[in-house]
Image (tube, grey):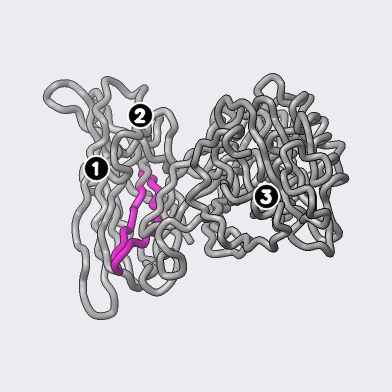
Amino acid sequence: MKIKLFLALLGLGFLLFFSSRLEARISATVDYLCFPGENGSGRLVLLFGIEGKSMVWKKSQNGLLSGRASFAVGINDSSRNFFAERLDFNLPELRDSSGMDRTFSAWKVIDLPAGSFNVEMLVFDPFSSDTTKERISFQFRLEDAREKEVFSDFLFLDPALFKASEPIFSQKADAVRMSDFFSKQDTILRFYAEAHGLLRRFPEGSPLVSRIRILDQESKTSLDDFGKISRTKSSGRMVWVTDLILKNLPSGNYTLSWDLIDTAGKFIARATRNFKRSNPGLNTVFSKPGIAGLAPELLGELQSIPVEDCRHLVASLFPISRSSDQPSIDYLRKKGTENELRNFLADFWDKKSGTNGLRDFRAFKKTVAEADRKFGTQTMKGYQTERGRVYIQYGKPDMVENEQSDRFRKAMTNLNTIPYEIWYYYSLDEPIRQTDVMFVFVQQNRGNINYKLLHSSGIGEVRNSEWRKVVESNATYNFDRMNPDDRGEIGNPKQAR
């Protein structure tokens, strides 16, 4: 956990400022953040804030005013010293005293091995010989990613000054936000964080879900309207630079929480950091629930849908979602909160359909209901069946034939043929424009009405050139024989017949 140390360094000094001597008051802040690393290493990040009006300023030969703050830092464990250095930070030169009413920032990144450490610090103003030197001491621990999954602390960034093209720890000090206070003018919360050690539990590239939330500190309520859920993949070092929109976040004390979750909904690790928000005019209630920028009519429609129906609608997105969305959908259908479910649906249809989001969502909702009614079973929802999946993904077929009405059936002597259906689509637009596409479903188990997809001429679907032989010979087909590598083949429905 990050600890903030407030220093009030009071002393008597003399300020040489236009030949006048003024009493000096010195104040500064010191924060620290821990960034555990791979291979038993890590970083300690020291953040310094110096109030300009409290410094002793000297006039240089070029007529400008200059100030300096010094921090003598020593870091050791129980047996040895790891760092000992005097850090002198020269403040920007000023033309006159009007620029002193600022807080100047500086930072230092120190590489260390994993372990527990003591920090001894001496803070002083080298331009004032009368200022009392203040001693600061604290302890911290850098976790070892070789032993468990670890998250770093959050490093708040200035959206206007942060340069995405530069390495994070090479940024200038003004790109790093020293304060955890966000005013009304701060509409974006940007932060950097790392995760290490995940390969101990997950192979490289395993799908995971990253969930970022804002919690009310007092009630611990999750304000999911301001969070994000996204798909990611495991690696030895995972880094995030993330933005959250604060425009509609009212005044209050909050906790920024970051969870990493596997696709089964199991919690892996968490990092948190507290922050404060001042937003006059939004002191007690939110101006509008939901994600900033989304169409209000779509949000209003979702607010009227019961939460369990929203959960089912999110799960039913599987057939039409991108692979990058599916780990998030899998998590949400199992563990998602009410706001997370509604916000995901709103965001999904807003991105997919834009201004037609409400219209397309209503059409999707109707299609899901039809798939449940026609193809759902006692143990499976519509989208979980093969016919329901195709129905949701491609829509209602233009023509359907079965074992009795199949125009191309040859073996008419076998009246006890395996039950099957052939769906015909005259044209499809997904994943690309296709014409004369067919899907063949067979009743795998005579004891239920669930049909399995045996063959399709559609791009990206499973292909089986023996499908007609299977259905006409009343064979019990081994579905494990279907080669998943065939899913990318381009078929000709006329040849497949």
Residue 266: image quadrant is bottom right
Q: CA distance from mark 2 to mark 1?
A: 15 Å
Question: Which residue is identified by label 2?
Answer: 100
Mark toward the viewer: 2 or 3? 3
Residue 406 left/right relative to 492: right
Q: Amino acid at mark 1?
A: Phe
Picture residue at 54% right of the left edge, 64% below the top: 268
Viewer can see residue 56:
yes
- Mark earlier in primary sequence (2, 1): 1
Is 254 above or below relative to 73? above
Instruction: Check residue 415 for magenta coloring.
Output: no
The residue shown at (26%, 20%) is: 95
Q: Please name the predominant secondary structure of the magenta segment in the image.
A: strand
Report the span colored magenta: 26-47
Q: Residue at x 57, y 40 (%)?
A: 322
Say which amino acid is labelled 3. Leu
Q: Identify the residue under disc 3.
A: 453
- Contact check, label 2 and label 3, Cβ < 8 Å: no
Q: Which residue is mark 1?
A: 89
